[in-house]
Image (cartoon, grey):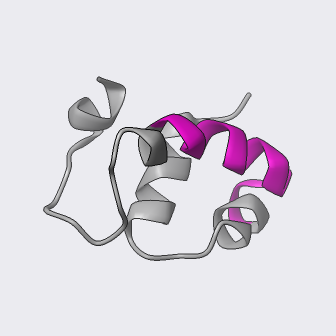
């Protein structure tokens, strides 16, 4: 099972989409699928620090 929070944390830290895929052992398409809602809501990498609770929301 994929820990979606970990995908967000990797991406938000400025890593490419393929870096969390390789690190977490998931496909890049899966990473894109989970990042799409965050990107659609205007979240971009490198913003103010966010906790796991922030990502859970």
Specify the quadrant that holds the C terminus.
Answer: top left
Could you tell me residue 55's position as x and y percent?
32, 36
Residue 47 showing in the rendered view = yes
Residue 2 x/y as whole percent: 68, 34
Residue 19: image quadrant is bottom right
**Residue that appears at 77% across and 42% down:** 30
- Secondary structure character of the magenta stretch overall: helix
Q: Is residue 27 left or right of residue 33?
A: right
Point out the stretch of residues depicted in magenta. 23-37
Pick whichever, 32 or 18, lies toward us. Answer: 32
User: How far across and down, in percent of the image, does residue 54 sit?
Assistant: 22, 35
Horizontal placement of 49 versus 27: left or right?
A: left
| Direction left: furthest residue | 48
Residue 3 magenta-highlighted: no
**Residue at x 61% of width, y 38% of height:** 34
| Residue at 50% across, 34% down | 37
* Residue 45, quarter of picture: bottom left
- Asked whether 1 or 8 is in front, the reply is 8
Vertical arrangement, residue 3 with respect to residue 9, above or below: above
Q: Position of residue 15 (x, y in %)?
A: 53, 76
Relative side of 33 to 15, left or right: right
Q: Is residue 26 visible?
A: no
């Amino acid at each position: 099972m994929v820990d979606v929070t970990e995908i967000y944390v990797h991406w938000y830290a400025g890593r490419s989409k393929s870096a969390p895929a390789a690190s977490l052992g998931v496909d890049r398409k899966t990473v894109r699928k989970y990042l799409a809602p965050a990107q659609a809501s205007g979240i971009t990498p490198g913003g103010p620090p966010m906790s796991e609770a922030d990502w859970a929301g």
